[in-house]
Amino acid sequence: MRLGLALPVALGLALPLAAQAVETDPANRTITPDMHTLPLHIGGRVQAAPLPPPMPKGATAYRHDWPGVYFESAFVGDRVVLKFDDASHEYRLLVDDSAPITLFRPGKAEITIGDLTAGEHRLRLEQVSESFLGAGRFEGFYIPKNERPLTVKPRSRQIEFIGPSGMAGFGARSTKPECTFNELARTSDTQQAYAVLTAKHFDADYQVNANSGHGLIRNVKEARKESGLIALYPRVLLEDPASYSDPNWHPQIIDIQGLGDIAIGDPEPGEQWATTDALWADWVTAYRGFIADLHRRHPRAAFIIEWPDDAIIDPPPYRAKFAAARDTLAAEARRDGVRMILFSYPDQKMLKEKMELTGCDHHPSLKDHHLFASWLIGLIDAHPGIWDGK
């Protein structure tokens, strides 16, 4: 039996090119040893490794495959060079307030952004798409030796999102639900999904630790043999068991969307659960343990658990199951010392009357994601102490 939960997914827009000159060097001869490597402020999980000479001092490769990663830097000058080794992702480059530059699967190349006005410039490179084809590498920003690097400070607010396709931007910019693999790659957009819209509204640094089709312990049929999000969460890369660690990452808010395990329906033949009750019991136990583990990692974080109101749940017999699960999760979290835990979801009227669901595989549209972001922003605004630990 499939539950009638409308789960948020993704959004998107076609973006104009900026006015700056963009030159691609597939031979990788633009960067010289005497250039400056720009210091980076990085959002999201990356695996860093130094690049050998003749690259400039401090040159580093940043391998990544969780969605929503971004790189920020600044400098004084009139040109900058970006280095990639990535045939998997789409990127969006923002230089100051100019129109974004789209870089789709740049491959192994050095890309120069020139014809900038002489002076100070701020850079932001956003990974747009999920890692449908594996991890990619961004290998840094570089400027000529006569230009001056600047430092970008991290933001005081941090928010983390954990969930499935709704946070990853799956098929976000599509205008039709039937998509080929290439259309999916061209229309997915984490950076315009509701999670990132919310983080940007509050000028917060963010992590989007999401993976389309993956529940906490149970995935959709196409990914059934893969690990669930709880097992993947400790990793710096989805495809690498090495652990993630960042002493500077202390989110004040952790938002979890863990409904996928239940929303995809009752257990099917061949799954590890013989009954629906067995699935629910394992799901609640795993959810409890996950919240407890996150609380140990970030003891001052407030939790937002995306959770349906009774009116959203269809069929009605499942309402009691959801209520009992919510009460259990809330009681255990408070017993563990979680300072704030909120269970919330957009109202039924919004879901039924305003959702377009025109993205790939009937995922939400740009309008839908703005609706979800307005709900989440309102929820956070309604709890003034959520950012300061009170």
Image: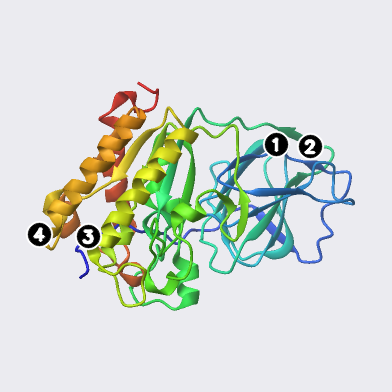
Amino acid on which disc 1 is placed: Phe
Helix, strand or loop under label 3: loop
Determine which residue is flagged by label 1: 75
Is 221 placed left or right of 71 in the picture? left
The CA span between labels 4 and 3 is 12 Å
Q: In this view, does 57 lie to the left or right of 149?
A: right
Q: Nearer the viewer, mark 4 or mark 3?
A: 4
Q: Badge 3: how crowded within 10 Å, few (<14), some, or many (20+)?
A: some
Q: Which amino acid does label 4 sit on?
A: Pro
Instruction: Name the one closer to the observer, 23 or 218.
Output: 218
Q: Sequence order check: which comes first, mark 3 or mark 1?
A: 3
Quarter occupied by the N terminus: bottom left
| Mark nearer the N terminus (4 vs 3) | 3
The residue positioned 14% from the left and 61% from the top of the image is: 314
* Vertical placement of residue 173 versus 82, above or below: below
For label 4, the residue is: 316
User: Do we see residue 342 in this rendering?
Assistant: no
How many angstroms separate mark 2 from mark 3 (CA)? 54 Å
Q: Identify the residue shown where x is 70% and y is 47%.
A: 48
User: Residue at image x 38%, y 41%?
Assistant: 291
Residue 105 x %, y %: 61, 66
Q: Position of residue 63 (x, y in %)?
A: 66, 54
Given the image, on which type of amino acid does mark 2 rest? Answer: Glu
Where residue 149 appears, as percent x and y from the top left, is 74, 34
Q: Name the residue under label 3.
A: 5
Residue at the farthest top position? 390
Tell me if mark 4 has few (under 14), some (14-19) or many (20+) residues whose alpha carbon lies within 10 angstroms of its own. few
Q: Name the residue under label 2.
A: 147
Helix, strand or loop under label 2? loop
